[in-house]
Image (cartoon, rainbow, N blue to C red):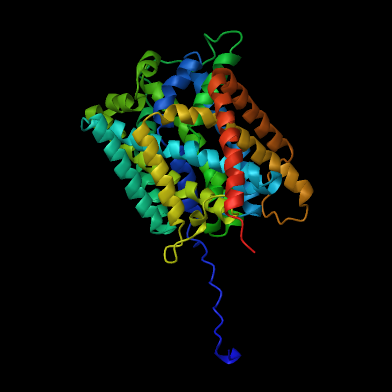
Amino acid sequence: MDGKNVRIKPKAEKIEFKKEIGLFSGVSILAGIMIGTGIFLSSANALKAAYSNPLLTVLVWFFAGIVTLLAGLCYGELGASMPKAGGSYVYLSKAYGNIVGFLSGFSSFIVGNSGSIAALAVGFAWFLKFFQPLTNFQEKTLAIVLVLILTIINCLGVKLGSIFQNITMVGKLVPLILIILVGIWMSRSGNVFSFTDIPQNPIGGISVALIMALWGYEGWTNLNTVAEEIKNPRRNIPLSITIAIVGVTLIYCIFNIALLKILPIDVITASQNPAGEAAQVLIGNVGGGIVAVGILISILGALNGCILVFPRSYYAMAEDKVFFKPFGKLHPKYKTPVNALIASAIVSIGLILIGDFGQLTTMVVFSSWTFNALTIISIFIFRRKYPNLERPYKVVGYPIIPILALFSIGMILFSTLTEELTFSLLGVGLTLGVGIPAYYLFKFTNKEKN
């Protein structure tokens, strides 16, 4: 054959993410996921656990924010020094090996992340009952439609998904600001902010209240997952994390103060929606309607944020050849991991149909917090293993801040293990028993032939 006529097939150009997430969008993603239903529904439970003491309750929400900020600062260093899609998966894999990162991502894919998406979608349909009664079939249908619509939006580009996130972020603040601005100057309830009527040994109640408050901050780890799509990630990742957590902490604390000034303690603790009742006290049924709309917008924002960020971890896993190969491909036009987004939607819809995702999610809570602790420990490993790694941002107060963050997470793990021993152990067993064989199966099947 004439060598001159041989055509050399050009190497396919690698498709990369678009950097379209700015500082405001970064803050919106984090705060939008954190401000879901937690602050609207957890206030009553946290107050009960904190011995129905207003001052102690506000301090619990404040301390929960401090704990979250300590851990967030650690993630800020990791994200700024390694701005790669995948977040914790990337850090765990680099620090401990791919199998540890895989176990974290795999358990999130089959239950944790997908269960969060399913729970938020069903929660939206449940809260819609304020305006329109729905049957169980209608609730599930609406939840599935929501997941599909938001998945399509995020398939069409991260810019479109982040714009939707920004809009819902502004919308969800309306009921919170309404209650804060009007309620903070009122004192109809007669509640006294002091340390009276607290047991001599309040640690047990405070621990439970802290756990409940911390769920209101869930989502603070997720910006790192979309690191490759953030403009100037070395600056904007740590800055977005700090602004979001500090801002959410202030909103939560002031909101609880306002709530306690408007409603008596027994009304709050007996209510399933104290925010709605507070708004009704302020401006009647219109206020309750505004809060209900705000909660729906809040859930939409949290749901959209989860659908946006979670599949990036599955993409990173596939890139490392330890997950389904199609998940590691980006759409040539929209530059989004469409296959991973679709797979995430399918698993979430499956959990919606099953309806028992709540117990399954509880099973992986202990292991997910364990992976959070391992991620923070990786800072010490990277500082020693890669001393010359460029670190545009270093966690302040090192090593004290990471140690305090680990101590706080240790408290959460201990409390979770104490409260949910069976489910915690089942979660670890599920993660290891299914995850380890799955890891080696993917390694074998994805092995490139020579």
Position of residue 316 measured from the top left corner of the image (x, y, whole percent)? 56, 53
> Going by the image, does 249 lie left or right of 288?
right
Q: Judge by depth and name the residue closer to the eye, 52 or 150.
A: 150
Give me the residue at 60% from left, 34% from top.
Answer: 432
Is residue 177 visible in the rendered image? The answer is: no
The residue furthest front is 1
Position of residue 334 measured from the top left corner of the image (x, y, whole percent)? 42, 63
Q: Judge by depth and name the residue closer to the eye, 16 or 67.
A: 16
Which image quadrant for residue 306?
top left
Q: Judge by depth and name the residue closer to the eye, 273 or 113.
A: 113
440 versus 230 height, above or below: above
Position of residue 260 measured from the top left corner of the image (x, y, whole percent)? 41, 21
Give me the residue at 52% from left, 53% from top.
Answer: 315
Give me the residue at 54% from left, 42% from top.
Answer: 106
Is residue 349 visible in the rendered image? The answer is: yes
Quadrant, the N terminus: bottom right
128 versus 207 height, above or below: below
Position of residue 218 measured from the top left corner of the image (x, y, whole percent)? 50, 35
